[in-house]
Protein backbone atom coordinates (compact mmCIF):
# COMPACT_ATOMS: atom_id res chain seq x y z
CA UNK A 1 0.00 0.00 0.00
CA UNK A 2 2.83 2.39 0.93
CA UNK A 3 4.58 1.56 -2.32
CA UNK A 4 1.43 2.37 -4.29
CA UNK A 5 1.02 5.72 -2.52
CA UNK A 6 4.66 6.52 -3.24
CA UNK A 7 4.19 5.82 -6.97
CA UNK A 8 1.11 7.98 -7.10
CA UNK A 9 2.97 10.80 -5.36
CA UNK A 10 5.84 10.57 -7.85
CA UNK A 11 3.39 10.62 -10.74
CA UNK A 12 1.71 13.75 -9.32
CA UNK A 13 5.07 15.44 -8.84
CA UNK A 14 6.02 14.76 -12.47
CA UNK A 15 2.71 16.19 -13.63
CA UNK A 16 3.26 19.35 -11.58
CA UNK A 17 6.76 19.69 -13.02
CA UNK A 18 5.36 19.43 -16.57
CA UNK A 19 2.72 22.06 -15.84
CA UNK A 20 5.39 24.40 -14.43
CA UNK A 21 7.75 23.86 -17.39
CA UNK A 22 8.31 26.76 -19.84
CA UNK A 23 7.31 24.55 -22.77
CA UNK A 24 3.95 23.72 -21.22
CA UNK A 25 3.31 27.36 -20.36
CA UNK A 26 4.08 28.35 -23.96
CA UNK A 27 1.71 25.71 -25.30
CA UNK A 28 -0.98 26.80 -22.88
CA UNK A 29 -0.46 30.47 -23.82
CA UNK A 30 -0.57 29.67 -27.55
CA UNK A 31 -3.77 27.67 -27.13
CA UNK A 32 -5.42 30.46 -25.14
CA UNK A 33 -4.34 33.07 -27.72
CA UNK A 34 -5.66 30.93 -30.60
CA UNK A 35 -9.01 30.44 -28.85
CA UNK A 36 -9.35 34.18 -28.18
CA UNK A 37 -8.48 34.92 -31.82
CA UNK A 38 -11.10 32.45 -33.09
CA UNK A 39 -13.71 34.00 -30.81
CA UNK A 40 -12.87 37.54 -31.94
CA UNK A 41 -12.99 36.64 -35.64
CA UNK A 42 -16.27 34.75 -35.18
CA UNK A 43 -17.88 37.71 -33.44
CA UNK A 44 -16.61 40.10 -36.12
CA UNK A 45 -18.00 37.90 -38.92
CA UNK A 46 -21.34 37.58 -37.13
CA UNK A 47 -21.58 41.36 -36.63
CA UNK A 48 -20.68 41.94 -40.29
CA UNK A 49 -23.41 39.56 -41.46
CA UNK A 50 -26.01 41.11 -39.16
CA UNK A 51 -25.14 44.66 -40.24
CA UNK A 52 -25.06 43.69 -43.93
CA UNK A 53 -28.41 41.91 -43.68
CA UNK A 54 -30.37 44.37 -41.60
CA UNK A 55 -28.59 47.75 -41.63
CA UNK A 56 -26.28 48.77 -44.50
CA UNK A 57 -24.88 47.14 -47.61
CA UNK A 58 -22.34 48.18 -50.24
CA UNK A 59 -23.45 48.67 -53.84
CA UNK A 60 -21.55 49.74 -56.97
CA UNK A 61 -22.87 51.62 -60.00
CA UNK A 62 -22.33 49.49 -63.14
CA UNK A 63 -24.07 51.64 -65.78
CA UNK A 64 -24.60 55.29 -66.70
CA UNK A 65 -28.39 55.32 -66.26
CA UNK A 66 -28.19 57.68 -63.25
CA UNK A 67 -25.62 60.16 -64.59
CA UNK A 68 -24.80 62.83 -63.53
CA UNK A 69 -26.21 62.03 -60.08
CA UNK A 70 -24.35 58.72 -59.87
CA UNK A 71 -21.44 57.73 -62.11
CA UNK A 72 -20.10 54.40 -63.27
CA UNK A 73 -17.48 53.46 -60.70
CA UNK A 74 -19.28 54.99 -57.70
CA UNK A 75 -19.52 52.75 -54.64
CA UNK A 76 -22.45 53.41 -52.31
CA UNK A 77 -23.48 52.49 -48.81
CA UNK A 78 -27.20 51.65 -48.82
CA UNK A 79 -29.49 52.04 -45.81
CA UNK A 80 -31.51 48.81 -45.74
CA UNK A 81 -33.23 49.47 -42.41
CA UNK A 82 -35.12 52.55 -43.62
CA UNK A 83 -37.62 50.56 -45.71
CA UNK A 84 -37.57 47.46 -43.51
CA UNK A 85 -34.90 44.82 -44.19
CA UNK A 86 -36.03 41.35 -45.17
CA UNK A 87 -35.21 38.41 -42.93
CA UNK A 88 -33.14 35.96 -45.03
CA UNK A 89 -34.90 32.89 -46.43
CA UNK A 90 -38.31 34.22 -45.40
CA UNK A 91 -40.86 36.66 -46.72
CA UNK A 92 -40.80 38.53 -43.40
CA UNK A 93 -39.66 42.15 -43.31
CA UNK A 94 -38.66 44.15 -40.28
CA UNK A 95 -40.74 47.24 -39.47
CA UNK A 96 -39.91 50.11 -41.84
CA UNK A 97 -38.90 53.54 -40.59
CA UNK A 98 -40.12 55.23 -43.78
CA UNK A 99 -41.79 54.56 -47.14
CA UNK A 100 -40.35 55.38 -50.58
CA UNK A 101 -41.33 58.90 -51.63
CA UNK A 102 -41.34 60.59 -55.01
CA UNK A 103 -37.79 61.63 -56.04
CA UNK A 104 -36.16 59.12 -53.65
CA UNK A 105 -33.25 57.16 -55.11
CA UNK A 106 -33.73 53.48 -54.29
CA UNK A 107 -31.86 50.20 -54.73
CA UNK A 108 -34.11 47.29 -55.68
CA UNK A 109 -34.11 43.81 -57.14
CA UNK A 110 -34.65 43.90 -60.89
CA UNK A 111 -38.19 42.52 -61.40
CA UNK A 112 -37.17 40.41 -64.42
CA UNK A 113 -34.08 38.93 -62.73
CA UNK A 114 -34.03 39.16 -58.95
CA UNK A 115 -30.38 38.16 -58.78
CA UNK A 116 -29.53 41.68 -60.03
CA UNK A 117 -29.75 44.95 -58.11
CA UNK A 118 -30.74 48.18 -59.84
CA UNK A 119 -30.66 51.79 -58.68
CA UNK A 120 -33.20 54.33 -59.99
CA UNK A 121 -35.26 57.30 -58.83
CA UNK A 122 -38.89 56.91 -57.76
CA UNK A 123 -41.13 59.11 -59.92
CA UNK A 124 -44.53 57.46 -59.40
CA UNK A 125 -46.17 56.30 -56.16
CA UNK A 126 -49.07 53.84 -55.80
CA UNK A 127 -52.18 55.47 -57.29
CA UNK A 128 -50.27 58.09 -59.31
CA UNK A 129 -50.88 58.84 -62.99
CA UNK A 130 -47.52 59.14 -64.74
CA UNK A 131 -46.85 60.23 -68.31
CA UNK A 132 -44.23 61.85 -70.53
CA UNK A 133 -44.76 64.48 -73.21
CA UNK A 134 -41.78 65.44 -75.39
CA UNK A 135 -39.40 64.10 -72.76
CA UNK A 136 -41.01 66.00 -69.85
CA UNK A 137 -42.42 63.99 -66.94
CA UNK A 138 -45.96 64.60 -65.71
CA UNK A 139 -47.38 63.17 -62.48
CA UNK A 140 -51.11 63.51 -61.82
CA UNK A 141 -51.30 66.05 -64.63
CA UNK A 142 -48.54 68.33 -63.29
CA UNK A 143 -45.23 68.81 -65.02
CA UNK A 144 -42.35 67.87 -62.72
CA UNK A 145 -39.39 70.14 -62.07
CA UNK A 146 -36.41 67.77 -62.17
CA UNK A 147 -33.11 69.60 -61.93
CA UNK A 148 -31.22 66.30 -61.66
CA UNK A 149 -32.37 65.00 -65.08
CA UNK A 150 -30.19 65.14 -68.19
CA UNK A 151 -31.02 64.38 -71.84
CA UNK A 152 -28.03 63.15 -73.80
CA UNK A 153 -29.95 62.43 -77.04
CA UNK A 154 -32.58 65.17 -77.40
CA UNK A 155 -34.82 64.87 -80.44
CA UNK A 156 -34.06 61.17 -81.01
CA UNK A 157 -37.29 59.64 -79.74
CA UNK A 158 -38.14 56.05 -80.75
CA UNK A 159 -40.63 53.22 -80.31
CA UNK A 160 -39.64 49.95 -78.63
CA UNK A 161 -41.80 46.79 -78.44
CA UNK A 162 -40.93 46.55 -74.75
CA UNK A 163 -43.23 49.53 -74.13
CA UNK A 164 -46.29 47.44 -75.03
CA UNK A 165 -46.77 46.28 -71.42
CA UNK A 166 -48.09 49.78 -70.71
CA UNK A 167 -51.38 49.01 -72.48
CA UNK A 168 -52.56 47.00 -69.47
CA UNK A 169 -52.25 50.00 -67.12
CA UNK A 170 -53.42 52.97 -69.18
CA UNK A 171 -55.71 55.64 -67.77
CA UNK A 172 -59.38 55.23 -68.87
CA UNK A 173 -59.29 58.17 -71.28
CA UNK A 174 -56.50 56.64 -73.40
CA UNK A 175 -57.56 54.74 -76.55
CA UNK A 176 -55.75 51.40 -76.29
CA UNK A 177 -56.33 50.64 -80.00
CA UNK A 178 -54.32 53.65 -81.18
CA UNK A 179 -51.84 53.85 -78.31
CA UNK A 180 -48.24 53.86 -79.54
CA UNK A 181 -45.78 54.67 -76.73
CA UNK A 182 -42.29 55.97 -77.37
CA UNK A 183 -39.35 56.67 -75.11
CA UNK A 184 -40.30 60.31 -74.60
CA UNK A 185 -44.07 60.21 -75.15
CA UNK A 186 -46.29 57.72 -73.29
CA UNK A 187 -49.09 57.36 -70.73
CA UNK A 188 -50.85 58.35 -68.61
CA UNK A 189 -50.21 55.07 -66.78
CA UNK A 190 -51.89 54.23 -63.46
CA UNK A 191 -49.45 52.91 -60.83
CA UNK A 192 -51.04 49.93 -59.05
CA UNK A 193 -51.29 49.59 -55.30
CA UNK A 194 -48.07 48.40 -53.69
CA UNK A 195 -45.96 49.31 -56.74
CA UNK A 196 -43.67 52.14 -57.84
CA UNK A 197 -42.65 53.68 -61.15
CA UNK A 198 -38.90 54.33 -61.34
CA UNK A 199 -36.68 56.05 -63.89
CA UNK A 200 -33.00 56.86 -64.36
CA UNK A 201 -31.81 60.46 -64.23
CA UNK A 202 -30.08 59.93 -67.58
CA UNK A 203 -33.46 59.74 -69.30
CA UNK A 204 -32.19 58.97 -72.81
CA UNK A 205 -29.97 56.12 -71.65
CA UNK A 206 -31.87 54.27 -68.96
CA UNK A 207 -33.64 50.91 -69.02
CA UNK A 208 -36.31 51.61 -66.42
CA UNK A 209 -40.03 51.26 -65.71
CA UNK A 210 -40.85 52.56 -69.17
CA UNK A 211 -39.44 49.31 -70.58
CA UNK A 212 -40.16 46.58 -68.03
CA UNK A 213 -42.85 47.88 -65.69
CA UNK A 214 -43.39 48.64 -62.02
CA UNK A 215 -41.29 47.77 -58.98
CA UNK A 216 -43.12 45.89 -56.25
CA UNK A 217 -42.64 47.34 -52.78
CA UNK A 218 -41.17 44.05 -51.55
CA UNK A 219 -38.35 44.30 -54.10
CA UNK A 220 -37.07 47.64 -52.79
CA UNK A 221 -33.99 46.97 -50.66
CA UNK A 222 -32.95 50.40 -49.42
CA UNK A 223 -31.94 54.00 -49.94
CA UNK A 224 -28.33 55.01 -50.78
CA UNK A 225 -26.65 57.07 -48.08
CA UNK A 226 -23.36 58.32 -49.52
CA UNK A 227 -20.52 57.52 -51.92
CA UNK A 228 -17.72 55.87 -49.96
CA UNK A 229 -15.40 55.33 -52.93
CA UNK A 230 -15.29 56.24 -56.62
CA UNK A 231 -12.90 55.75 -59.52
CA UNK A 232 -13.02 56.33 -63.26
CA UNK A 233 -13.32 52.93 -64.93
CA UNK A 234 -13.12 54.43 -68.42
CA UNK A 235 -9.45 55.39 -68.11
CA UNK A 236 -7.11 52.87 -69.74
CA UNK A 237 -4.50 53.16 -67.05
CA UNK A 238 -2.93 50.39 -64.95
CA UNK A 239 -4.77 49.90 -61.65
CA UNK A 240 -7.46 52.57 -62.27
CA UNK A 241 -9.05 51.75 -58.90
CA UNK A 242 -5.88 53.20 -57.38
CA UNK A 243 -4.66 55.78 -59.91
CA UNK A 244 -8.02 57.22 -61.08
CA UNK A 245 -9.80 57.78 -57.76
CA UNK A 246 -12.42 60.56 -57.88
CA UNK A 247 -11.56 62.09 -54.53
CA UNK A 248 -14.09 64.91 -54.99
CA UNK A 249 -16.95 62.38 -54.94
CA UNK A 250 -15.84 60.38 -51.90
CA UNK A 251 -18.14 61.13 -48.97
CA UNK A 252 -20.82 62.86 -51.05
CA UNK A 253 -24.40 62.29 -49.92
CA UNK A 254 -26.75 60.73 -52.48
CA UNK A 255 -29.76 62.91 -53.27
Image (cartoon, rainbow, N blue to C red):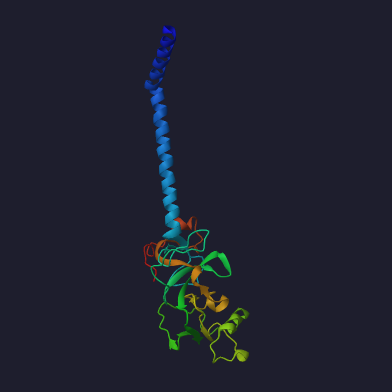
Is residue 221 among the parts visible in the rendering?
A: yes
Q: Name the residue nearer the viewer: 98 or 33.
A: 98
Q: Is residue 213 above or below residue 54?
A: below
Q: Is residue 132 above or below residue 65?
A: below
> Total marks drawn?
0
What residue do we see at 44% from left, 66% from top? 222
Q: Quadrant of residue 83?
A: bottom left
The residue sitting at the front extreme is: 1
Q: Quadrant of residue 245?
A: bottom left
Q: Name the residue nearer the viewer: 150 or 185.
A: 185
Is residue 135 among the parts visible in the rendering?
A: no
Q: Which quadrant would the C terminus be assigned to in this image? A: bottom left
Give the x, y percent position of residue 24: 41, 24
Give the x, y percent position of residue 58: 45, 60
Give the x, y percent position of residue 38: 44, 40
Give the x, y percent position of residue 77: 42, 62
Q: Which quadrant would the N terminus be assigned to in this image? A: top left
Amino acid sequence: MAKKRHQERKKQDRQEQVERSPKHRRQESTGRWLWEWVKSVSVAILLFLVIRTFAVEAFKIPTGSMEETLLVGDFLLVNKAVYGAQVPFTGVRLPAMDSPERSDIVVFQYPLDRSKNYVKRVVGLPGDRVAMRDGELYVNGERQQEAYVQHTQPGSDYYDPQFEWQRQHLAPEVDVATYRPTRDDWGPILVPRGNYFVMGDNRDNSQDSRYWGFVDRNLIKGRPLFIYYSFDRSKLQPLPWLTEVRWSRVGNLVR
